[in-house]
Image (cartoon, grey):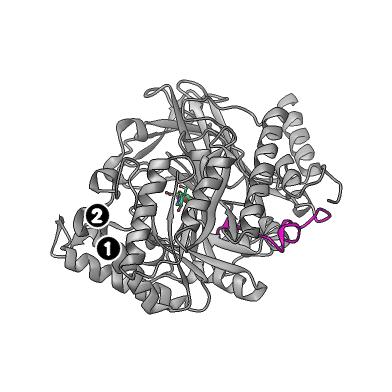
């Protein structure tokens, strides 16, 4: 009776709090409760030992990071609705800590549309202990959605690079999925200054977005429309997203962003035509023998086709293209095959000029950018890119913009180092843009996870304010025109998984509940709550 009363109280309380329990899995009945393996090699078995109760579901035999247990989100989920998903995870053998991702797979009524895979949240778990992953997820309000599944996996690595540590056996238990009432979703404040207006006149400010976020049902939508005059897809225009197989172009998701930009008069940056990451392996492979690399001639012809199709498709919509991304080495000169560039390994330096020429031919009005990281902190890397661009200009290669990514930390580099990089490139007669700004709260990979305390947020606010003061000065002097943040709120940042998977970061202007952080107030030049 007590147990039953407890359950009734729990259900009543959750309903009163605005959440309706939809389903749970505790594996006590001995069945996998509707969970299925994502791949073919892994096995799901109900085993003794659970987070609570007698049993849990064990996942063994994984050989890739993405293998694991998957389950339909709910018997009848609705586009645009919000769900709270909670799963307990444990692993017994392997490294001392491991990150596990809760992810979602989306499929569409049009069966030929590629599935979308979303890493919702990543949590570090200690070996031998149960750790909980919780995430509140709003399903995109896309009426053509046909499938939404949630699954547990390891942070992504290419199949051939996954080590036994990446594919450890694990168990899940006490899964609970609830529908969250609309009133409980995070709502960005609407009575605060608009970032874009405060900076107008000197700087255009934008952010990286995903296609779901330009839907009015998504909580980020209000942040975007209110504060940002420019957007760039974080992933949706990368080669793997736009041409997953040779000759099969999939523009649907990226088109949502281009349509939003058109409708709202928002500037759209295109990112990125050529990169050594997130590019399908077919680009670099001999079609007759998949074990052999493509010839240089074939690779350059694929480069030309990709650029002609993609830039042609977005002609008149994308104002600046990142034509090549991260082509400079972290040591000296260009990124070579040892630093992961199959472009360089096969084609040598020639692919860079070829990419710019192809982009100019496909849209003569788009500005063409070369984009890279650590230009603010490493003088050697900055100077290597400077020499590269200088040479390109001398050869008549159409390069218009240098993009400084700006993935920095609250601890460094100094504002003055950043300023020197902007000034150096401005002397080349190119435009300078800051393309991917975020300020990690960590000093490096060895720092353990920490909470963004008031002190840390205050330091971050000071750094953001000083940087934006400098950006405005450089903009007024004609040396900088645009600053893009790499995300709008801390609930959606790549830094949760880099350089340490599952170590949560807080690098942006809005927090995980989409509320303005001290950094926001510092950039708009006001105390929290006051109009500047
Ligand atoms: O934000 C992107 C993240 O979702 C991807 O997992 C990651 C894969 O490499 O790429 C991130 O974006 C990168 C951008 O395209 C280029 N500069 C570095 C960014 C952070 O890794």
Left or right of 141 on screen, residue 48? left
Neighbourhood count class around disc 1 (C-alpha, 10 Å): few under 14, some 14–19, many 20 upward? many
Q: Residue at x 23, y 48 (%)?
A: 337
Which residue lies under the disc numbered 1? 351
Left or right of 523 on screen, residue 163? left
- Give whichever of 135, 409 is nearer the camera: 409
- Asked if the stretch drawn in magenta spans residue 198, the answer is yes
Which residue lies under the disc numbered 2? 344
Cβ at disc 1 under 8 Å from ligand 1 = no
Q: Residue at x 47, y 55 (%)?
A: 425
Instruction: Let me know if residue 511 appears in the view.
Output: no
Q: Magenta residues, as a range?
A: 190-210
What is the secondary structure assignment of the residue under circle 1?
helix
What is the secondary structure assignment of the residue under circle 2?
helix
Q: Residue at x 21, y 57 (%)?
A: 348
Counting from the top left corner in percent of width and height, residue 507 is at 60, 41
Counting from the top left corner in percent of width and height, residue 112 is at 40, 70
- Asked if the stretch drawn in magenta spans residue 220, the answer is no
Counting from the top left corner in percent of width and height, residue 51 is at 55, 25
Counting from the top left corner in percent of width and height, residue 483 is at 59, 56
Dots 2 and 1: beta carbons under 8 Å?
yes
- Give whichever of 368, 506 is nearer the camera: 368
């Amino acid at each position: 009776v007590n147990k039953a009363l407890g359950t009734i109280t729990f259900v009543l309380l959750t309903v009163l709090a605005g959440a309706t329990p939809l389903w749970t899995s505790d594996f006590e009945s001995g069945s996998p409760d509707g969970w299925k393996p994502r791949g073919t090699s892994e096995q799901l078995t109900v085993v003794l030992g659970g987070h609570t109760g007698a049993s849990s579901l064990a996942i063994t035999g994984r050989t890739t990071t993405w293998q694991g247990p998957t389950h339909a989100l709910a018997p009848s989920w609705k586009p645009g609705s919000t769900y709270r998903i909670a799963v307990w995870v444990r692993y017994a053998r392997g490294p001392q800590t491991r990150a596990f991702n809760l992810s979602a797979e989306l499929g569409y009524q049009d069966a030929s549309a590629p599935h979308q895979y979303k890493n919702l949240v990543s949590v570090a778990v200690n070996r031998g202990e149960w750790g909980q992953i919780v995430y509140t997820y709003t399903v995109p309000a896309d009426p053509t959605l046909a499938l939404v599944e949630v699954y547990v996996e390891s942070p992504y690595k290419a199949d051939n690079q996954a080590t036994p540590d990446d594919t450890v056996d694990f168990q899940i238990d006490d899964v609970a999925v609830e529908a969250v009432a609309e009133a409980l979703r995070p709502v960005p404040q609407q009575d605060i200054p608009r970032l874009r207006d405060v900076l107008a006149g000197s700087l255009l400010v934008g952010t990286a977005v995903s296609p779901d976020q330009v839907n009015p049902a998504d909580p980020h939508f209000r942040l975007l429309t209110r504060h940002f005059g420019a957007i760039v897809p974080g992933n949706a225009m990368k080669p793997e997203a736009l041409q997953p197989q040779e000759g099969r172009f999939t523009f649907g998701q990226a088109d949502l962003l281009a349509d939003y930009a058109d409708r709202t008069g928002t500037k759209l940056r295109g990112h990125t035509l050529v990169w050594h990451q997130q590019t399908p392996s077919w680009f670099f492979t001999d079609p007759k023998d998949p074990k052999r690399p493509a010839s240089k001639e074939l690779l350059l012809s694929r480069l030309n086709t990709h650029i002609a199709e993609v830039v042609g498709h977005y002609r008149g919509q994308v104002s600046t293209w990142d034509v090549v991304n991260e082509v400079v080495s972290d040591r000296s000169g260009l990124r070579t095959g040892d630093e992961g560039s199959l472009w360089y390994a096969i084609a040598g330096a020639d692919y860079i000029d070829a990419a710019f020429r192809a982009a100019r031919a496909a849209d003569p009005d788009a500005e063409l950018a070369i984009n890279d990281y650590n230009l603010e902190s490493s003088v050697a890397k900055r100077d290597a890119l400077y020499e590269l661009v200088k040479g390109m200009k001398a050869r008549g290669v159409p390069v218009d913009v240098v993009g400084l990514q700006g993935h920095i930390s609250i601890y460094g580099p100094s504002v003055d180092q950043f300023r020197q990089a902007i000034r150096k490139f401005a002397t080349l007669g190119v435009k300078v843009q800051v393309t991917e700004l975020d300020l990690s709260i960590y000093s490096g990979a060895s720092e353990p996870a920490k909470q963004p305390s008031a002190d840390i947020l205050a330091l971050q606010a000071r750094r953001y304010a000083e940087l934006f003061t400098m950006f405005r000065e450089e903009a007024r002097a004609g040396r900088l025109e645009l600053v893009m943040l790499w995300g709008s709120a801390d609930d959606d940042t790549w830094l949760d998984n880099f350089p340490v998977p599952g170590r949560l970061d807080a690098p942006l202007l809005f927090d995980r509940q989409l509320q303005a952080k001290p950094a926001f107030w510092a950039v708009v030049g006001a105390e929290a709550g006051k109009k500047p």
